[in-house]
Structures are given as C-alpha cells and as structure tokens.
Amino acid sequence: MLLALTATAGVAEVAVAALLESRPALVHTVTGAGGPGSWTYYADGLEIAAATVFGLALRGAILVPALSRVLSRPLRPNAVYPLHGVRFTLQRAVARLTSTRFTIALFGDSSAIVHYLKALGYRLAPIDQTGSNFGTMLGQEVPTLSRVGTGTMVSDGLSMANAEYSSTSFRTAPAAIGSHNYLGNHIVYPAGGRTGDNFLLATKVMIPVSGPVRENTGLLGSPPIEIPRSVERDHRFDHLTTGSGLRRRLAAKNHHNAVTMALFLTVPCLYVYGLLLIAMFPLTGDGGLYWLETAGTALLELAFTVGFFVLAERAVLGFRTLRPRLCSIYEPAWKVPSILYLAVFNGTPFKPAIWRLLGVRMGHRVFDDGCRILERTLTQVGDGCALNAGSVLQAHSLEEGVFKSDRITIGNGCTIGTSAFVHYGVVIDDHARVDADSFLMKGEHVPAHAQWRGNPAAELTGDAACRGMP
C-alpha cells in the first residue's frame, strides 16, 4: 500500500497509510468494520475513500489558493533575503503548495484552469477563454509574481522560474509572458525573459534573458534560433475560434470536460476504496507470521494498483487503440491519464511488461529507467532498447489550437538518453542513439546506427560521433 500511495499521493497520505497498515486494529476501531461479511466493511471503506479524494480536491481548490496568497505577502519583488530564513521557508512552502499535481491535472485543459490560477495569484486579465489556455502540468515558485498575457496558450510542463538563488541568498522577481503567445512542452520561463507579444516558444526552448525584446516571431532550440511564428497548416481551424459558433463549441467543450473531471475524481476514489478494502481485511496470523501477512497485503495492493489503472485506461478507450489525428481542440480527444504509479517499477523488468498491458508495442529485454510514454497505443519500441530516466515519448502536440498526433516507431537496440524528448511522427531505425537532453522534432527519421544530439537534435558525424559513444 505504501509503495502504491508513494507513487500516487503525497507525504501526508503516505503517513496515514503507514499508520493504518501497521495498526490494523486502529482501522477496525475507526471504521467499525466487521469483516468482508458485513455491509459496514464496504460502506465504511467507501466513505473513507470518498472523503480522502474529494477532500484532496477541495483542499487544492479552496485552501491552497488562500494559503498561497497569505504566505506570499511577505515576499517583496527583487528584495534579497538570506537562504534558510523565514522568508525562504515561506517561498518554498508556496512553491510546494501551488504545484500540486492533482489539482492542476484536474483543472488543466479546461475553462476552469484560468480561474484556479487567478485564485492562486496569477495575473491573467483580460482573459481570452479558449477552453484550453493551460495544460495539465504547470509549476511556479511565486504565483503572485507570475503574469501570462491574454490569448496565450500553454502546453504541459511550463515552469515559471520567478525565484533566483545564490550560495547565500535568494530573491523573487516577476516573470511575465506576453499576449497571444503559444508555448510548447517543458519550458522554463525565467524572470526577465526577453520575449514579447505574438510569440511562439517551441518545446524545450531556452528563453533569452538579454538583448532586445522579440515579438511576432518564434524561437526553437538551445541556444535558440528564430523560426516563423506559425505555418499555414496551423490556421486551418481558425474559423472555429471566432464568431457565434465559438460560444457553442466552448459550451460543448465545457460539458465534455465536466464529464471527464467527474471521471478523474471517480477513478482515484474507486482506487483508494480498493486499497482500503484490502488494508481492512482481517489478518489471522500472530507473532512471527504477522509480518508475512502484512508484506503479502502490500504486494497485493501493488498488484491491484497496476491492474486497476490498466483496466481503467483501456476501458476509457473502449478497449480500442488510438489513431493519428489532426483536429481542433473542440473535438473530443483522449485526455492523457496519470502514470505516476509506474515510477515504482523504474529500472525493473516489470516496467516494460506494464507498458505492454497499457498498449505499447514493447519489445523484449527493454531497460526503462523512468521514461514517460504518453500515447501508449501509438508507440512501438523494439527489442533491446534503453529508455533512460526522464525521457519522454510524446506522440501528440497542441499548436495554435490544433491537436496533432502520429505514431512513434523505435527500432531494435536503440538508446533514448536521459531527459531526451521524442515528438510525434518520429521513426528511429535499429541501433540508433538519441543523446541526453536532446529534442527530436516531429517527423524526423533517424537512420540505423546514427547518433543524434542537440535541441533540435541533428546527426553527429565522424569524430564527434565516435567521441560521444561509451
């Protein structure tokens, strides 16, 4: 149970689980459960599960915004404070509280996310509601010093870095993103970033902090190079974002998102319910056998975790596979589910086996040390591959309100380096290598035995490739 909750919940939840797991008598005292033959056993478990999940949701929606605003008040912009002092403690508490994955994932990619961020302290006015202004992964160090301009759309993985640290002190400073921007995945936006309005920031781009403020263009890579703000294909659905039809489409999207948010709360509620039923099951052993039964319970709960989330994901898809798509954000599409529980299996032979259950066409003898595969049924990984920690295989993109997805195919004996990002439509032939922290862009074809590196990734040739091989 503790392993499962560590991967899916916070420190407080794990502490409570540890208490209940080690003191089964306490469980029965609190719940009054008489055992599997009693209705009280099931009713009490359901009540505790619902209180846990919906309490967590209410904490994130109501308590966290109020606390973050109160704790942020002593933090003045550009004032220098010593490390490990009171204000440092307040700043770390604010960053921790406001980056709760559960709440951001609940409201992300829906109209509700802008209202939640405003409650945290973000400056967003005036809001140009698209129904998908922010994704489901977002982090910030001081929300009250974060500003995002009107009409800007943000994909998953934005981090507003509005705190700076030295060996002795730290300071907070405003981080401001312009209006009518589009931001790709995994971007760290620092205080003083030199980008303005109508700007495209590609996935994993390095934000310039010196030089003139750029507008009406785009940046790609690290170090960044200028690219066009948009291409013609990205505007084929522009007619859906204006006129009287927008209100109708936005209402339909809000209705669809309300259903998915209800499912998002129901699934963990049922999951916690299952864990509690297992934890409350009466143990018959005593003395030296009790520890064995406790260990067996923990393993059973871990197996339940895998089976439950695999079944839930496949059921939501109707036990079908995803198909490559090109559509607007107002079309019903698959919302990427949580895979936090898989972190327990990183670096073990069980991780590839679970990927297969989730729909990945996974080869034999694959080493996965912490890869994230987002569209499981659109991804193929060959035999003998190595997927290093922090790597991402993402078979979709959201660009200018256009949702795009395509397959990712990785051959035999390939290596995906630490924190490398592989985008949709990529084909990697046998025994090729994508180096650490590289960004392999959409539609790239990596030849067999080639080595690619950089952001954006390109092939290394000659001596450079030889020096890069272990």
Image (tube, rainbow, N blue to C red):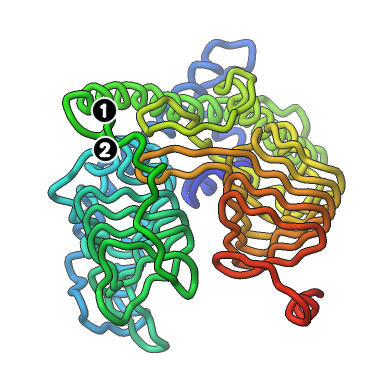
Q: Residue at x 31, y 81 (%)?
A: 210
Q: Which residue is mark 2?
A: 130
Q: Residue at x 28, y 68 (%)?
A: 195
Residue 179 numbered mark, or none? none
Residue 210 seen by the camera:
yes
**Identity of the amino acid at label 2?**
Thr
Q: Residue at x 60, y 67 (%)?
A: 437
Q: Are marks 2 and 1 in contact (CB under 8 Å)?
A: yes
Side of 203 where 329 appears, left or right: left
**SS at mark 1 in the image:** helix
Q: Is residue 244 above or below residue 388?
A: above
- Residue 251 in the image, given as x and y percentages of width and height: 25, 23
Instruction: Check disc 2: other Cα within 10 Å, few if <14, some if 14-19, many if 20+.
Output: many
Residue 16 seen by the camera:
no
- Residue 279 in the image, given as x and y percentages of width and height: 63, 31
Quadrant of res 377 = top right
The residue closer to the viewer here, 75 or 272, is 75
Q: Is residue 247 above or below residue 234?
A: above
The residue closer to the viewer here, 3 or 465, is 465
Side of 4 where 85 appears, left or right: left
Q: Which residue is mark 1?
A: 250
Side of 249 where 125 appears, left or right: left
- Residue 288 in the image, given as x and y percentages of width and height: 82, 42
